[in-house]
């Protein structure tokens, strides 16, 4: 039971720290999440529009195909635009967070005294820091 609590506390600790870095860019988080949410809603609505086309235009022959075709094209363009926005802003967010993490690692290394810096395997520290931050 204790190991499980320690694992949960450890998980909550790194997640809380990472969310602190992410929320520095609150606008980007909100824009990326909003674009993802709206894109999902448009994607979900597309089959409903297609159902109307089949029910009213193909089966009942009571409506015109033109407005539905225009709506479907607009929905596709909207999905593309929102997907692009989500990926662009999300990518910027990831790069900004990586930059902040790298700065903090560098500051931590700079706080070490000269003797401690001499004992560090420099290549391994830089390599690990770079690869680990990129994975995050």
Image (spheres, rainbow, N blue to C red):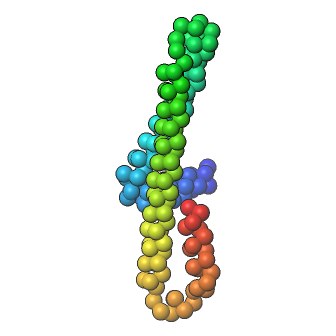
Seen from the viewer's position, the closer of residues 81 and 32 is 81
The residue located at (48%, 42%) in the rendering is 82
Quadrant of residue 129 in the image? bottom right
Image location of residue 35, percent across then percent down: 46, 42
Quadrant of residue 120 in the image? bottom right
Q: How many marks?
A: 0
Seen from the viewer's position, the closer of residues 114 and 41 is 41
Seen from the viewer's position, the closer of residues 13 and 91 is 91
17 left or right of 133?
Answer: left
Image location of residue 11, percent across then percent down: 55, 55
Can residue 16 be seen in this snapshot?
no
Seen from the viewer's position, the closer of residues 111 and 49 is 49
Residue 103, relative to residue 59: is it above or below? below
What quarter of the picture does the C terminus occupy? bottom right
Quadrant of residue 22 in the image? bottom left
The residue located at (58%, 79%) in the rendering is 125
Image location of residue 91, percent across then percent down: 50, 57
């Amino acid at each position: 039971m204790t190991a499980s609590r320690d694992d949960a506390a450890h998980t909550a600790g790194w997640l809380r720290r990472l969310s602190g870095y992410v929320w520095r860019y609150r606008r980007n988080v909100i824009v990326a999440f909003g674009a993802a949410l709206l894109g999902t809603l448009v994607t979900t609505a597309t089959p409903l529009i297609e159902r109307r086309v089949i029910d009213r235009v193909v089966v009942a022959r009571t409506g015109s195909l033109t407005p539905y075709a225009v709506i479907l094209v607009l929905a596709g363009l909207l999905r593309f635009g929102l997907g692009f926005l989500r990926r662009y802003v999300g990518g910027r967010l990831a790069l900004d967070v990586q930059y902040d993490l790298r700065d903090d690692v560098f500051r931590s290394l700079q706080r070490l005294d000269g003797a401690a810096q001499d004992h560090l395997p420099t290549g391994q520290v830089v390599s690990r820091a770079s690869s680990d931050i990129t994975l995050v």
